[in-house]
Every structure is written in C-alpha cells, then in structure tokens.
Image: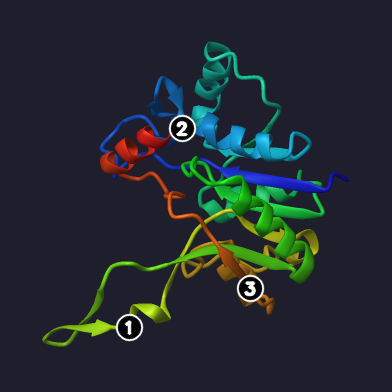
C-alpha cells in the first residue's frame, strides 16, 4: 500500500468554456491543462499514486495526447461515471494510499505547499480541505430585492481535499444525492469533522475564457 494517492477528476465537458473540447484538454502554452495538473502532484511526490478519472468516450483522445506530448508521468486511467460521485467511487476501488487526495483536473495552479499542508492535516485529523476568504462584498436575494451579507462568515473551498483512506471509503458507502457538492460534504454527512488549511489564491478552477487567460499568465 502506497503512502499517498491522488484522484484527479476530469469529467467536465466545457459548456461554460463554449468549447466542443472538454476543458481539461484545452491547451495552455501548447500543453493540455490536465498535464500541468498531473505534473504538480508528481513534482510534489514522485512516488504518489495518481489515478485519473476520464469519460470513457475521451479515453482514446487522452492516450493520443500522451503520445503527442511525450508525457510519461505514470498514472492510472479510471472510467468516469454518470456523476462525479460515481467516478470517485470507481477510482476508490483501485486506490491504495493511506491518505487520499481528490483534486479537480482543471486546477493546475495549486501550489506544492497547499498539497503538503492538506496531506499533513488529513493524516493528523482525518479530513482536510483548502479554503480562502472571500475578498468581494456579497449580497443575497431576498423577497423584494437583495441584502448585504457578512462575507467573513464564508469561505471559498478549493481542492485537493484530503482524507484518511477509511474515512473516505466510509463516506462513499452512502448513496448519491444531488446535495453532494464535493467530497468534503459527503464525508461530513458520514459524521467526520472537516479541518481547513489556507489555500492559495491562484488555485482557481478553470471554467471560463477569462480563467484560461489568467492561468496562461502563470503557466
């Protein structure tokens, strides 16, 4: 059993990007986003077990990209399911790490320090996620208009989300429902407390054209 695993989820189909190509395959500086993401975790720990969940229809395309870009970082491809929940569940059947991270394939700007802190906190307390404070003012809709809310009460959740193996396996024994927004919410439902660590501001989830330009500057 390896010490650490990461499940990188790449099931997006690019609707908000207005692209026929799933966003994880879009090129930044002539390389697919997904390759940057995988490399961050490999650079963090070359011994980490990397599992990649992909839609079955795009598996051959990814394998062609690996050859085209001479990408040799070892990883295991797992067939994605109908929902993200199903994809993670499929990956967990093959996962061997004592601490398991789950990370969005379109977050290539996560810093090694964020990954390190998340793994360390999860090893200690069971479950850890990176968060950042909200910088903008916020309002919520109410009957007849909107009202200001206290932004200090809210945090933006990022990935990787890290969990001790048995805690994540237990959480995924629960049935799927639409209220599951991420792995932490499912783990919390199983009764586990979620600890937070400081994320990094640049660790955005690439979903729009402006995100793509932002990431291009960093990569």
Residue designated by label 2: 33
Picture layout, residue 199 above or below residue 127: above
Spot the residue most to the left. Answer: 144
Label 2 and label 3: CA atoms lie apart by 29 Å
Residue 119 picture location, percent across and down: 71, 56
Residue designated by label 1: 150
Residue 162 can be seen, yes or no = yes
Q: Nearer the viewer, residue 42 or 49?
A: 42
User: Which of marks 2 and 1 precedes in the sequence?
Assistant: 2
Residue 116 picture location, percent across and down: 68, 52
Tell me the quarter of the image containing the N terminus: top right
Secondary structure found at label 1: loop
Q: Nearer the viewer, residue 53 or 145?
A: 145
Residue designated by label 3: 194
Which quadrant holds residue 137? bottom left
Residue 168 can be seen, yes or no = no
């Amino acid at each position: 059993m390896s010490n650490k695993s990461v499940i990188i989820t790449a099931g997006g189909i690019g609707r908000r990007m207005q692209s026929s190509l799933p966003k994880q395959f879009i090129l930044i500086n002539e390389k697919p986003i997904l390759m940057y993401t995988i490399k961050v975790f490999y650079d963090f720990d070359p011994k980490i077990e990397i599992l990649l969940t992909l839609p079955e229809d795009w598996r051959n395309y990814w394998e062609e990209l690996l050859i085209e870009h001479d990408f040799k970082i070892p990883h295991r491809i797992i067939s994605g399911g109908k929902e993200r929940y199903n994809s993670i569940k499929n990956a967990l059947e093959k996962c061997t790490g004592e601490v398991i991270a789950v990370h969005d394939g379109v977050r290539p700007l996560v810093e090694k320090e964020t990954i390190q802190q998340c793994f360390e906190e999860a090893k200690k307390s069971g479950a850890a996620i990176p968060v950042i404070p909200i910088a903008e003012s916020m309002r919520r809709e109410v009957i007849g208009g909107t009202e200001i809310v206290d932004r200090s009460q809210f945090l933006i959740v990022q990935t990787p989300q890290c969990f001790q193996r048995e805690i994540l396996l237990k959480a995924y024994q629960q049935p799927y429902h639409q209220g599951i927004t991420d792995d932490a919410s499912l783990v919390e439902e199983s009764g586990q407390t979620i600890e937070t660590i400081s994320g990094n501001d640049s660790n955005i989830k690439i979903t729009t054209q402006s995100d793509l330009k932002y990431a291009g500057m960093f990569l």
